[in-house]
Amino acid sequence: MPGTRNSRLLRLAARPVCAALLFSLAGATTLSQAAITDTPTQVQARVTSSEAKTRHPIVLVHGLFGFDNVLGIDYFYRIPESLAGAGAKVYVAQVSGANSSEIRGEQLIQELKNLRALSGNPSLKFNLIGHSQGAPTARYVAAVEPGLVASVTSVGGANGGSKVADILRRIPEGSASEAVVAETLRLAMLLLGALSGKDPSQLPEVPLNALNSLTTVGGAAFDKKFPQGRPAPGSTCDVKSGPAEANGVRYYSWSGVQPLTNAFDASDVAMGGLSLVAFGSETNDGLLAVCSTRLGTHLGDYRQNHLDEVNQLFGLTYAGLWTLFEKKPVQLYQEQAARLKNAGL
């Protein structure tokens, strides 16, 4: 059963998404004890309002090299607790940190089905909020299992692929250099996964699969198979919204548009460097061109980089005079939850 926030920290977030946790009937309301080895832990917080009390639970889906929680530190830094404190029922997905969007999507489907079965509600749906590669991961679920999904919200989503991935893909395929890079990333992800409680036999790390998914060619291929919510192919960057609804699922998105946001944030150096190398004068968040992030109803562009979008590093996001007027990341998630609530989702 879902535990408390305290147990979540004490267990070092030991809640891997087990792809093998299948139940025999899709609408089953119970699972045999043998079939249940672990489930995502519901994030708990002292509830101070009902502002974010959505009809359907919220599930946060991490991006490339992501995790749910490592040694008590959330990928979505302080965001799950803020949503739970505002009345939402919140879960954080645990899928492969480095694999294709389709494989990650299949892992997420099994997690959602497991949660549905444990809830006793065979028609339970979820509001998926995905960051970076978490957005196409959530889109895959909505496309192949729309009955599981009430809405998909993309935050700095890698929906059209990334020119940074294009640069990395220039390493000759099948070369020794590619093998070394792939193995180094795989080992790094296994270490990170061990710290976050992932089972590598259930959530395999295959960096080349992730890289191929995240190139602009990979993004275009994904869009062709799963176009729901995306602007029409060939649309200019002036087209900020795609279809708001498809197959009963609502789609939303927002993104960051400023790689360098805080001189005291060490991650800004990387974001700024990647921006110069990959994007030049094209508006981007350090890893993604803003044009490639569009999905469903456009909710805004903000002076955030790719890590600011999940309130990292450790809440040290943008600084400057505009902070008097710009919404902080946590506030954006709370406002989206309120929007979903008001829409009956």
Image (cartoon, rainbow, N blue to C red):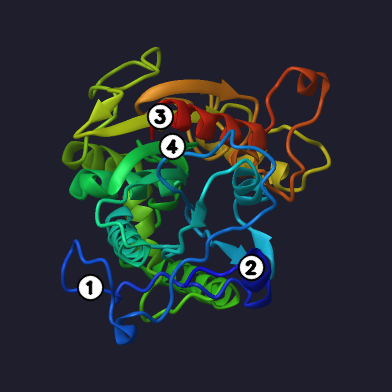
| Circle 3/circle 2 CB separation < 8 Å | no
Point out the tag, 3 or 4, that comes first from the N-terminus: 4
Judge left or right: residue 314 versus residue 281. right
- Of circles 4 and 1, the one toward us is 1
Q: Which percent across, then down, holds residue 301?
A: 55, 22
Dot 2: element:
strand
Q: What separation in Å lies between label 3 and label 4 (alpha carbons)?
A: 6 Å
| Circle 1/circle 2 CB separation < 8 Å | no
Dot 2 corresponds to which residue? 70
- Of circles 1 and 3, the one toward us is 1
Point out the tag, 4 or 1, that comes first from the N-terminus: 1
Dot 1 corresponds to which residue? 23
Give the crowd class for mark 2: few <14, some 14-19, many >=20 residues within 10 Å. Answer: some
The structure residue drawn at horizontal position 71% and vertical position 49%, both measured from the top left corner, is: 313
Q: Which percent across, then down, holds residue 197?
A: 54, 76
Q: Nearer the viewer, residue 101 or 333?
A: 333
Point out the tag, 1 or 3, that comes first from the N-terminus: 1
Q: What separation in Å lies between label 4 and label 2 (alpha carbons)?
A: 23 Å
Give the crowd class for mark 4: few <14, some 14-19, many >=20 residues within 10 Å. Answer: many
Residue lying furthest top in this view? 238
Judge left or right: residue 249 versus residue 86. left
Q: Which percent across, then down, holds residue 311?
A: 67, 43
Against 234, residue 335 (above or below) is below
Point out the tag, 3 or 2, that comes first from the N-terminus: 2
Q: What separation in Å lies between label 3 and label 2 (alpha carbons)?
A: 28 Å
The structure residue drawn at horizontal position 56% and vertical position 70%, both measured from the top left corner, is: 3
Dot 4 corresponds to which residue? 154
Kind of residue sitting beneath label 1: Phe
| Circle 4/circle 2 CB separation < 8 Å | no
Point out the tag, 1 or 2, that comes first from the N-terminus: 1
The structure residue drawn at horizontal position 60% and vertical position 50%, both measured from the top left corner, is: 80
**Based on the displayed image, in which of its 4 quarters is residue 157 positioned?**
top left
